Image: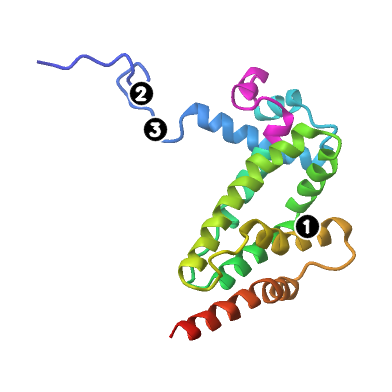
Amino acid sequence: MRQKPSAHSNGDGNGRKRPPGRPRSEEARLSILHSTLKLLAKRGFSELTIEAVAAHANVGKATVYRWWPDKAALIADAFARSTTSKLHFPDTGSVRTDMSQQMRQLVKILRGRRGRIVSAMLGAGQSDRSLIAAFRERFMKPRRQEAYATLRRGIRRGQLRKNVDMDLLLDSLYGPIYMRFLIRHDSLTPEFVEGLCELTLGGDRRHAKLSHAVRN
């Protein structure tokens, strides 16, 4: 029996299949995110509007709101997507090396054109709670979860104390980076990252080695 054409076929009505590729909805979403970053670089946060993004991405305003409740969430997602692949934590076997490599990548982003977006978000976020909340939830939180997993690997390997305060440790590593980035009292360099890791993780490493030596 010959199979009838499906009502959900991806053909064009003449029996020809549509070329493979991203679904239209995904193309529209990516176009919106790209347009957001482009317009944000040109206009800044305060001048950016959902209407302008929709027009630049060649979609309706309702399409933008289908995925993002407001401008803050859209900007945070656009920035997060543009940097996520560069900010994954490696697994080298050394917690210090893992943290150092990821922190170096963050510094590189902050020193580049994406850094202006972070600066705009953090600045505007001081008076716009929705923006700073979106930045925390959509950018910071996923990175934090990865960092926890990295530290837990270090604990399992005996490179960190079992009772280490992971939040305090992460704040001690990343807080100085954001301080230099925002206050600009000194430069962000790879050497600065290494100094932070030595100061913050060096003690834990020596403690872990000492504990291992005592046990054996």
**What residue would you read off at disc 3?**
19
Closest to the observer, 2 or 95 = 95
Which numbered disc flags the more N-terminal residue, 3 or 1?
A: 3
- When the figure is inspected, residue 200 is found, relative to residue 115, above or below; the finding is below
Of circles 2 and 1, the one toward us is 1
Image coordinates for residue 181, horizontal then vertical, percent: 81, 58
Circle 3 packing at 10 Å, graded few (<14), some (14-19), many (20+), is few
Determine which quarter of the picture holds residue 161.
bottom right
User: Which amino acid type corresponds to the residue marked 1 in the rendered image?
Assistant: Tyr
The answer for how far apart the CA atoms under marks 3 and 1 are is: 46 Å
Q: Which residues are magenta?
A: 58-75
Image coordinates for residue 122, horizontal then vertical, percent: 80, 45
Circle 1 packing at 10 Å, graded few (<14), some (14-19), many (20+), is some
Which numbered disc flags the more N-terminal residue, 2 or 1?
A: 2
Q: Secondary structure at mark 2?
A: loop
User: Which amino acid type corresponds to the residue marked 3 in the rendered image?
Assistant: Pro
